[in-house]
Image: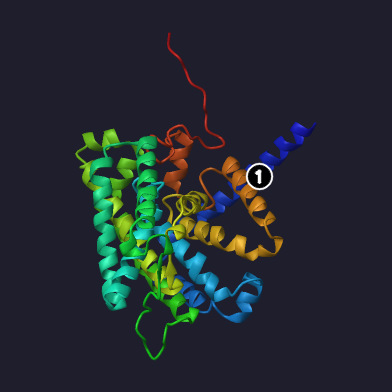
Amino acid sequence: MKGDHVTNGSNTFRRSADAMSGRLDRVRDWWTHAPQWQRWIVYIGLIVGALILPAPWVGSFMSPYSDWTTVLIFPVGTYILMAVGLNVVVGLAGLLDLGYVAFFAIGSYSLAYFGTAYGWNFWYTLALGVGITAVSGVILGAPTLRLRGDYLAIVTLGFGEIVRITANNTTEIGGARGITNIPHPPPMFGTKFLFDPAPYYYLILGAIVLVIIFSRRLETSRVGRSWAAIREDEDAAELMGVPTFKFKLLAFAVGAIIGGMAGSVWASQANFIAPTSFPFILSATILVAVVLGGSGNMPGVLLGAFLIAWLPERFRGLAEYRILFFGAALVLLMALRPEGLLPSRRRRAELAEGTGGMGSMGAEVGGPTADTSVEVSK
């Protein structure tokens, strides 16, 4: 009897999920054929909503236990920025990266070190940090991107730990003590950054808008189509003339650039960084955000990152139990809706076919309705 109740509840959830998917498909169809002026109305509405988001009346509901504007910077804004970058690697190119926090750390340390040791301007150090993370992405990818699936995941996990341990044992960049008094951006439009969270929110919002536009342009270009081919079947893409190694290396570099930008902006606002600020769990959290929202689908990734960052803060009053409930909800959702909250049609089709959309690492993952039977020829 108890099993019947569980089965009925699961079937009800799936029917609700299918109904939601149908509504989302109708929205996508409308968006595909919508005239340009309607799209601009939506864009302007989203930007206006984001600009008024720090208002106190919004914060009184969204974050009653913490300062809402600070929460919008970290974790919400930072997680969203990192998720967009990781989505390029995982969602678009299908490369499982478990060490993404390394690029976040490199961007943070670049800004902190050159700003404190040499007194360089924030914008110069930001550009330098982005460049260093791009190079680090290429350095990591060049010898490792010939690996696939779980082997690539293990190597990237090791890279993240190497960066953290190196920072912990290098006295030139503060060692275990970290770096303090990280410089803030110079005043802009009569506004001083210092420790006022509002200017930082608009700074990170501007960065998010830029990387979304950049990522979407790449996704709809020849580069994005090559990434999709690699994600679905790398061998077939290679046979069709796609230089898979070059495009995988480009995906790592682009993801590293966005991760380094997120780290630089966050370090300036935090004013202090240490090796303990960059644990493996941060990489895992951002990966969960990408998969939860809908890997490869930009609106889904944004939604997933927002929920992962906001929900623990919203229910902070439940103390340690909030993480327990949060984890249980994630497990339930991934079991019943593995394609994510807002999956793209391509991603849903890949899961239904059992390809997983994540190279060989996700090849064994099927959707809730996928046929998992296997024929064995004698």
**Residue 96 visible somewhere in the drawing:** no
Q: Determine the image quadrant of residue 217.
A: bottom left
User: Between 71 and 29, which is closer to the camera in this rendering?
Assistant: 71
Of all residues, the one furthest to the bottom in this rendering is 190
In the depicted structure, whether residue 318 falls above or below residue 6: below
Give coordinates of residue 10: x percent, y percent.
67, 40
Does 135 sit left or right of 356 as displayed? left
Tag 1: amino acid: Phe
Residue that appears at 56% across and 37% down: 368
In the depicted structure, whether residue 232 falls above or below residue 82: above
Tell me the residue that label 1 is attached to.
13
User: Between 268 and 294, which is closer to the camera in this rendering?
Assistant: 268
Number of callouts: 1
Image quarter where the C terminus lies is: top left
Give coordinates of residue 219: x percent, y percent.
32, 55
The way the protein has been coloured in the rendering is: rainbow
Give coordinates of residue 69: x percent, y percent.
54, 76
In the depicted structure, whether residue 193 falls above or below residue 109: below
Q: Determine the image quadrant of residue 173.
A: bottom left
User: Between 275 and 19, which is closer to the camera in this rendering?
Assistant: 275
In the depicted structure, whether residue 220 falls above or below residue 95: below
Classify 10 Å Cα crowding around label 1: few (below 14), some (14-19), many (20 and above). some
Image quarter where the N terminus lies is: top right
